[in-house]
Amino acid sequence: MKTITVLACLLFAGVLGFWLFSPSSGERRSETVAPGGPRAVLPGGRASEVPLREPATGDDTARPARASEQGLSTSDDRQRTSLDDTPRSGSNARVRPGQLRGAVQSEQGPIQGVQVDGIVAEQRVGSAQTDAQGRFDLRLARASSTVSLQFRARGYAPYELVLTNLRDGDSRHLGNIRLSPGTTLAGQVLDRRASPVPDCEIRVQSRARGLDANRHIATARTDAQGRFRYADAPPGPLLITAIAKGQGSASIRHDQRDGKELQLVLGPERKVLLHLVDEAGTDVPDVLVRLNPTGRLGEEVDRRTDETGRVEFDGLSDAPWNASVISESHRPRIETNVQADGEEVEIILSTWPCVTGTIRTDEEDIPAETTVQVLPSGVRGNLARLGGGTEHPVNGDGTFRVCGIRPGPYIVRLQAPGYAPSYSKTFQVGTTGDQSAGSILLLRGGALEVLVRGEDAPIEGAMIGVFATAPPDVLRWTDALGPMSRPLAQERSNPDGKALIDHLESGSVWTIVQAPGHVAEIGGPFTVTTNSTSEVTVRLLAGGRVVGKVIDNSGKGLASAVVSFTGHELVENAVQAVSGPDGSFASPPLPPGRWNIQGRWMSGRNRRTSFDPETVVLTAGEDTNFELVLD
């Protein structure tokens, strides 16, 4: 059992170290697959002849690509909307944008200059380009639980990856994204009289069911002879849809392997008109509706209702349609077999319950920026800080109302500047009707005063992080206060080695203390009591570092190699570092004494490993140079 526990810890340490030791400039290549996302990899094909996007400029406005030599107007800024773009539990919610990282590769290796765009609600909310190692760092200007990532590069088929379940302020590493060379796709659009249809919109999407990857690939328009051509279409089975406003649409299935020129004949134009209202008959504006054909694979169209709760879908074929409606404040609804006959169809949405309550203090006024969170009853702590849950502002009179709550047991967490977090009693939310959380009292909370000392003197500038639960030992050797760990609070020690961390809720807390040149320490549990200060002393041991380079047999530096340090009597689990672009690495400060060093490196199918550990002896306060050769 102990062996299994040690192996599990080593695996967790490796993954966390691999993630945390790479700066945004790109010093490693992840080999993981995008979590929670599709794992489809497009097959290879011929190189592109038509660029789908111009190189990015400082302008944030999306640009269509230049037309091909045949005069086609290719537009790849047809940006989609997901079904989950509204803030959770109310439109007045505070949300924070996140950060997405990854690497783009082909079968030949990393791809530099790939344009990566984040799309939310038909708007571009972030852009980035890959560096020489194919890595990108995309910061979102707007938070959303669902983001469409679009990848485009000359000579490669466009790729779209829809990420779901993104939490508030989430930072996620997507691993390796594979792009494939594009193939040529050409055809012509005719009307019912067999005449060419110019300026007709052509849409291409993957036919693979159950995958959001490449759900929409690109769009273009036909030329004066009704012809269109893609130079960078993905190979394999596709669905091609032609839409001409006022003339109808047509969809065909196509397998790129047959190499035939396509012909699409438009059918009569049809419209679907929908009117969304709630149970009281009130219009429901700004709700996303997704339309897709009933019983067959076809073009999915996303639209939002206007201020009157109405939405119109035109350019449709003569077929029954399904309308999927998802609203954070309303129950999901699917209206089946809607006819595209232009007759308005009313869809009645049922609302989810709301939670109400009142905030009170021992003072006269409610502090500005006071917020509440509605959390599952088993959760303690700030769920927004942990990457989920949304903070909602409290009204000036101390009342609050949070809607869109699903049935179940909940508590309300209250947060205000200068106060400790406070909680309501547990209450049950049903399927209908609002639920009151009662009156919640703001409390000043308790404080923790930490004294950080070395062997013979206080340590100034040490960073102290406070956690609600016992942090894993691996955080001693990484950035304990980084985005992965999310401490409750953090503070640096003053010249006397002291740091006061106040406004903590009562209960048990743990600390991680880090200081340059010293071995980080985890302490706790420490008891925090309301309106009192608990004093804690933490002693740090001066450490030594291993500084060196990872190379192959020819002396070339190996980037993104993982270096493991084991065998010290005071440290049970492995400590890891990751080499930079030139193969150089540096360990965190480690306890003095004897350490075993091993390394491993992987790039595609190429792997190098040091099978037998080498030994190094560290001295407190000194750096030990070491060159690690991987076979």
Image (cartoon, helix red, strand yellow):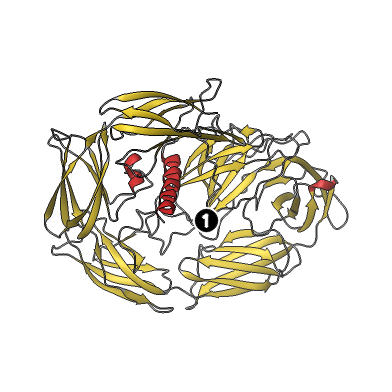
Q: Is residue 390 left or right of residue 66?
A: left
Q: Position of residue 282 (x, y in %)?
A: 48, 74
Residue at image position (36%, 33%) is 595
Q: Position of residue 49 (x, y in %)?
A: 74, 34
Q: Residue at x 41, y 45 (%)?
A: 13
Q: Is residue 63 left or right of residue 397?
A: right
At label 1, which amino acid type do we have? Thr
User: x, y percentage for residue 569?
Assistant: 31, 40
Is 286 in front, or is 601? 601
Using the image as rendered, state which of residue 586 and residue 387 is in the foreground: 586
Give the farthest residue toward the right.
194
Neighbour tally class for label 1: few under 14, some 14-19, many 20 plus, Cα within 10 Å: some
Relative height, residue 561 to residue 360 (above, below): above
Q: Residue at x 48, y 70 (%)?
A: 330
Secondary element under disc 1, as helix, strand or loop, is loop
The one of 563 and 603 positioned closer to us in this rendering:
563
Q: Is residue 162 visible?
A: yes
Relative image position of residue 166 (x, y in whole percent): 47, 54
Quadrant of residue 335 within the rendered picture: bottom right
Q: Which residue is tagged 1?
A: 164
